[in-house]
Image: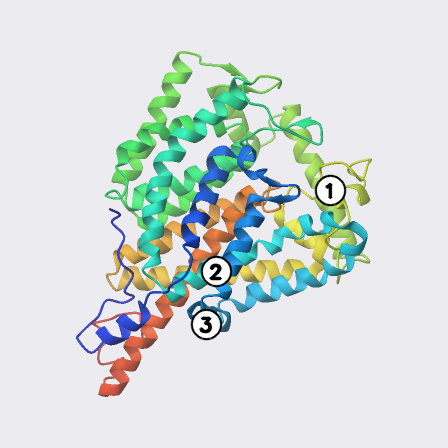
Amino acid sequence: MTAWPQPVMPQAIDTDVAPASAYVLRKTRGPDYLTVHSLLLLGYAVLGKLFAYIGFGSFYVGEIVLVLGILTFVTSPSQWGVLRSRHVWPLAALMLWGAARTVPYIETYGINALRDAVVWGYGTFAILIAARIAAAPETVSRLANCYASFVKIFLVGAPLVWVLSTGLGLISFTVHGRAVPVLKGGEMLVHLAGVIAFVYLTVRAVPIAWLTVAPVVFAVGATNRGGLLSLGIALIVLFVARRQTARGVLLAAAFSVVIIAAAAFDVRFKVPESNKELSPRTVAERVQSIFTDTSKVQYEATERWRLRWWKKIVQYTFFGPHFWFGKGFGPNVAYSDGVVSQTSDPLRSPHSGHFTFLARGGVPGLALWLFLQGAWFVGMVRRWRRCAGSGHSRLASMFLFLIVYWAALVINASFDVFLEGPMGGIWFWSVFGAGLGIMIAYDRSVAAVRHSWAKRGISCVATGKVLPGHC
């Protein structure tokens, strides 16, 4: 069983609070959508594109689960209240703007317009998850149990799939006639950040011994610089926020032993059908290339290519004709920006989710996106500090876990085509939605406690020492 609690936020201070807490924790009935959604996320993280392309024609597994979630939401009136929450309004504004910049292009670009629109359209998953958690906060404990199982499957399954596909070439996958990796290193490192945060914060949920496998995931995913940066920043956020060193030293020691052993024995691995080599030296070069000029053509060329493209997007939005509306969701911006020579090229979006919103939604689209992320982050941090300060350490761990996961996802999305596909986009909006749901449930519970006190004529000032941070 997970160490995380049934989230009564805050715990009943006295018997008068119990009815309010029971009301907040009421259960909902309906199809078991969460199980299906959890399996969807597991498939994306472990099987990658092999799983993502399961479906019928252009209707893939992600869209199938999305339809199931919408049907579950429509038939569960107890979940509709999430639409009235102020926490959802910024997301609704972004999705409305995205729809306004997509609908005019559907007739011309058809399915391509809808595929481009998933960068904001997958936000529907966030609303579905938030609605379920807000209506039944005990769902959080269930999701924590699911993630505890995910940790074990991911740590073993993802490296195995990578070795069989990218490592040994026994499994191949092609898109538009081009061979593509089944699992991307950046995605693996993002999930590794979440796994480490989960185990670090909830040792009883998953024994810390499982992290002895983590260096293997790190090694096979270290070919991606964006993933390395996302993992590094996420772990810095985690360790600084907790201000505890014992477990951090243990994790660092486990990584160090594996890396030092690999360096001592000069372990090298040549990735089939690629010029990439996996070794301690190449990992060190990739880390160095994030912060300094390494004079390595394979690193600097891609960096200059991205910067030139992003500079062009800034010029025709902030200082050009596409300031207000962008180029819309539908046109191939890579082709219109002169990055590719054919409209049928599979590269359609900048290697950054932020610049995707800017190029396609204009400055208003970028502003709505940044405001949404900022509001979510500030809201999560405030409630994490309140829970930590009032002694609700387990709930504080949940907030911090989601903050760390979100940080890893956002950093990786800043340097890769990540949010624009289901493997990154659905994971991102699911984590985002879980945070929304917990914030809504937490605020409702606090409001219930305040209401109970108000009925008894008790002021927040008088009870400040009992429930600090909630008044």
* Circle 3 or circle 2, nearest the eye: 2
What is the distance, in whole Å, between disc 3 and disc 1 at their CAs? Answer: 42 Å
Cβ atoms under marks 3 and 1 closer than 8 Å: no
What is the distance, in whole Å, between disc 1 and disc 2 at their CAs? Answer: 42 Å
Toward the viewer: 75 or 222? 75
Please name the residue shown 45% across and 63% down the image.
Answer: 131
Badge 3 amino acid: Gly
Q: Position of residue 157 (x, y in %)?
A: 42, 30
Task: Please give the residue where the numbered disc 2 appears in the rendered image.
Answer: 72
Task: Please give the residue where the numbered disc 1 appears in the rendered image.
Answer: 309
Q: Is residue 464 visible?
A: no
Quarter of the image for residue 59 reads top right
Q: Position of residue 19 (x, y in %)?
A: 24, 75
Q: Position of residue 406 (x, y in %)?
A: 47, 50
Q: Residues within 10 Å of mark 3 (few under 14, many from 20)?
A: few
Mark number for residue 81?
3
Element type at mark 1:
helix
* Circle 3 or circle 1, nearest the eye: 3
The quarter in which the C terminus is drawn is bottom left
Badge 1 amino acid: Trp
Badge 2 amino acid: Thr
Quarter of the image for residue 172 reads top right
Element type at mark 2:
helix
